[in-house]
Image (cartoon, rainbow, N blue to C red):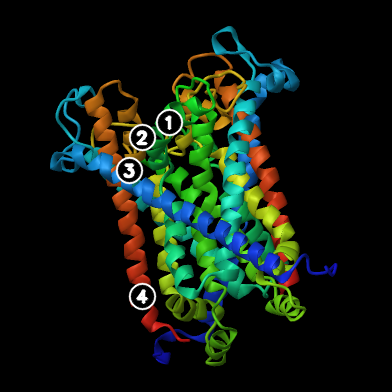
Amino acid sequence: MQVNKLGGPIGVRKFKDLAARRMMLVLTFIPGFIVLLMLFGLFGKARPILAVKPIASLLFSSVWSPLKGQFGLWPFIMGTLWVTFVALILAAPVSLFTAVYLSEYAPRWIREFMKPIIDLLAGIPSVVYGVWGLLLIVPLVSKVLAPLFGVYSSGYSILAAGIVLAIMIFPTIIHVSIEVFASIPYQVREASYSLGATKYETVRHVVLRKGAQGILASVVLGLSRAFGETMAVLMVVGNIPKAPKSVFDGAATLPTLIANNYGEMMTIPQYDSALMLSALVLLLVVLFFNVLARFILTRVERRAE
Amino acid sequence: MRLLPPRGTVARRKMKERFFMGLMRASMAVVVISLLLILGVIIWKGLPAMKLSMITQTPKGGYYLGKEGGILNAIMGSLYLASGATLLAVIFSLPVVLYINLYTKKNSKIATFVRFSLDVLWGIPSIVFGAFGFLVMVFLGLRASLLAGTITVALLEFPIMSRAMDEVVRLVPQDLLDASYSLGATRLETALKVVVRQCLPGILTAVLIAFGRGIGDAASVLFTAGFTDRIPTSLFQPAATLPLAIFFQLGTPYPEVQQRAYASAAVLTVLILAISLVSRALVKRLARHRIK
């Protein structure tokens, strides 16, 4: 290092350091500030409709007809819950098994091989997932899965959206749970082996039990990813504003509601307010899950140290 | 911990082991096959519709009815938008990451709080960023434009980039910092001349990850960037983006145009693949300069 280039009298250097410290300190509050700003901003925009209609009637009414001034979000809330639930049922076991394998069993080369694959799955844009779902999963549901169960389905359905979403949240669950497993000290496993336990028994009774909270957190993070996903779902879910009765029905979700109607929202009174309300609901739910999961993970991390 | 007696005979226990192993291997296969299926289907469906004019021309009149033209407007729009957003995000991410790792003690309250809020921000769906960006845009008196889209995408990229940078900056050995301080360097000098250089590969990866996210995200620009057939020439003009171009082309009732949507999806996928490959290569190359 060229020391003489460090430059300037000590006073100037100290001043620069102090100025940078102050400026950086201000910047560190930005992330928290943005979250708050989002909450207040969306709430502010949702207020006009909250002022004229009770919140319960907005959330639990199933009539969505903006032209008549009826903004019941229930069908969309149900749609979101169904889609998220299906995605979670499909993704959680696959991701957790994979994570256990990668962290406990796999030789180094498999781990190295899987890393870019998982990263890529996380990096593929949601529109591409949507196109793929449209090309492969929608026909699969309408031509194979629905006939299998003896029902008719156009393919644009909760099941299709759930399958696509499941793949989209693989990386989240795998990544977080691998980190959780890695935080469990190796000695704990050795203790189990020394008692004569097989590898499976060690994983089942030691690793999974010690990591239970962290696993829960990883699944919750996957859940909240699925909950807010927009474009991919928009392209395969059918966009039918009616509470679904089966996984082969089409539905609409809160994010797709917002994405679908942004064009018209300024033309009909209260419409924009209703959409901002659904964005607010979405934000609150996701915030709740995220704060919960991060809270658990911070504790897990601290325990490991 | 509860101690459990071994269940069943050794043979049975070993069988369980094998069964479990099979399940895990199958799960991993599902993950790998999913990726292969996605890449395979997108490329296989996209290639036949691919023409050179797709990526060298902007849409001509009646493009969305199946006439001549390409999606250069969307490709350029996305590149502009993601570049601007990534630049903005770096300007905000780097100081935050350096601050929580150098100016505060390890695991101080403020660092924990910042990491926590970044994680929370990271979990917020892009459609909510879109809605929020729209509010900011209206508040600032902007129209749907390259600038508004850039700001929104920068917000979206900020937590992704910061967290990825934090992961590497966190791992800088304390000894290295101490060595720098003992030479009389201030924290700022240490941050810029030692830490940034040491973490350059990781920082670049973080930047590229965020860039890829910026290019691929559609829900956040839906409200804010607008859509146009021209390549924007100023920050205040609306800009088309690749994901939205795919979405709109799919939305038309014409099979030829839908074919082009598949081709556009292939372009986007290849772009993302290329970014990821470049970042891997860069990391290998730059890692040589690291002090271990």
Instruction: Give me the residue at 34% from left, 49% from top.
Output: B39
Q: Which amino acid lies under the numbered mark 4 shown in the image of this protein?
A: Lys
In percent of width and height, residue A63 lies at: 63, 13
Residue B126 at least partly seen: no
User: Quick one: B145 or A264, which is closer to the camera?
Assistant: A264
Q: Which mark is residue A135?
A: 2
Q: Which mark is residue A292?
A: none
Chain identifier of the residue bearing label 2 in the image = A
Q: Name the residue beneath numbered marker 1.
A: A138
The reply to whether the C-beta atoms of the residues labelled 3 and 2 are less than 8 Å apart is: yes
Chain identifier of the residue bearing label 1 in the image = A
Instruction: Give me the residue at 40% from left, 56% from top.
Output: B87
Query: Which residue is most to the right?
Result: B2
Separation (CA) of disc 2 from disc 4: 37 Å
| Left or right of residue A251, residue B285 in this image | left
The answer to whether marks 3 and 2 sit on the same chain is no
The reply to whether the C-beta atoms of the residues labelled 2 and 1 are less than 8 Å apart is: yes
Separation (CA) of disc 3 from disc 2: 8 Å
Q: Name the residue beneath numbered marker 4.
A: B284
Q: Which mark is residue B41?
A: 3
Q: Is residue A299 above or below residue B213?
A: below
Q: Which amino acid lies under the numbered mark 1 shown in the image of this protein?
A: Val
Q: Which amino acid lies under the numbered mark 3 shown in the image of this protein?
A: Val
Few, some or many C-alpha atoms within 10 Å of disc 2 (few <14, some 14-19, many ≥20)? Answer: some
Instruction: Give me the residue at 48% from left, 69% from top.
Output: A111
Few, some or many C-alpha atoms within 10 Å of disc 3 (few <14, some 14-19, many ≥20)? Answer: some
Judged from the image, the secondary structure of the residue bearing numbered disc 3 is helix
Chain identifier of the residue bearing label 4 in the image = B
User: Quick one: B289 or A167, which is closer to the camera?
Assistant: A167
Q: Is residue B53 above or below residue A176?
A: above
Q: Which comes sooner in the sequence, label 4 or label 3? A: 3
Between circles 4 and 1, the one closer to the viewer is 1
